[in-house]
Image (cartoon, grey):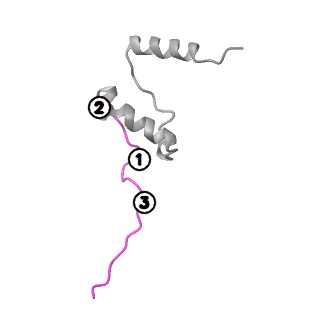
Amino acid sequence: MARSQLRVYYGPETDSATITRSDVEERKVSVPLGDILPLLADAVHSQRTWVRDFEHDEVTISTDLHEVILAYQHYRRPSA
């Protein structure tokens, strides 16, 4: 049996990594809300731990949707 050779990884060979604007833009994906909403709702309801990994990520939504969400938030408050 061949003996495996392990090496220690010391990190990248350059001193600093740079991320260009195009690298960041390539990581973005636009999808219809209806495609992901049921999956996200299920993940939150099931208390999946991976949801917490993204809780501070920003998402971009339309102004109309933002206004509807704010109105919903206001009207769903329990009355005193």
Q: Which residue is mark 1?
A: 15
Q: Residue at x 46, y 11 (%)?
A: 67
35 lies above or below 14: above
Residue 77, x across and y down, in percent? 62, 17
Residue 63, x across and y down, in percent? 40, 11
Q: Are the residues at dot 1 and dot 2 in contact (C-beta closer than 8 Å)?
A: no
Distance CA(mark 3)–CA(mark 2): 32 Å
Q: Quadrant of the N terminus?
A: bottom left
In front: label 1 or label 3: 3
Q: Which residue is mark 2?
A: 29
Decide which of tag 1 and tag 2 comes sooner along the chain. Answer: 1
Q: Main secondary structure of the magenta part?
A: loop
Distance CA(mark 1)–CA(mark 2): 30 Å
From which residue to which does the magenta span run? Answer: 1-26
Q: Which residue is mark 3?
A: 10
Considering the numbered disc 2 on the image, is that residue within a helix, a strand or a loop?
A: loop
Name the amino acid type tagged 2. Answer: Val
In front: label 1 or label 2: 2
Q: Nearer the viewer, residue 75 or 61?
A: 75
> Label 2 neighbourhood size at 10 Å, few (<14), some (14-19), many (20+)?
few
Considering the numbered disc 1 on the image, is that residue within a helix, a strand or a loop?
A: loop
Q: Residue at x 50, y 40 (%)?
A: 45
Q: Residue at x 30, y 34 (%)?
A: 23
Distance CA(mark 1)–CA(mark 3): 11 Å
> Label 1 neighbourhood size at 10 Å, few (<14), some (14-19), many (20+)?
few
- Which of the 4 image quarters holds residue 6? bottom left
68 lies above or below 23: above
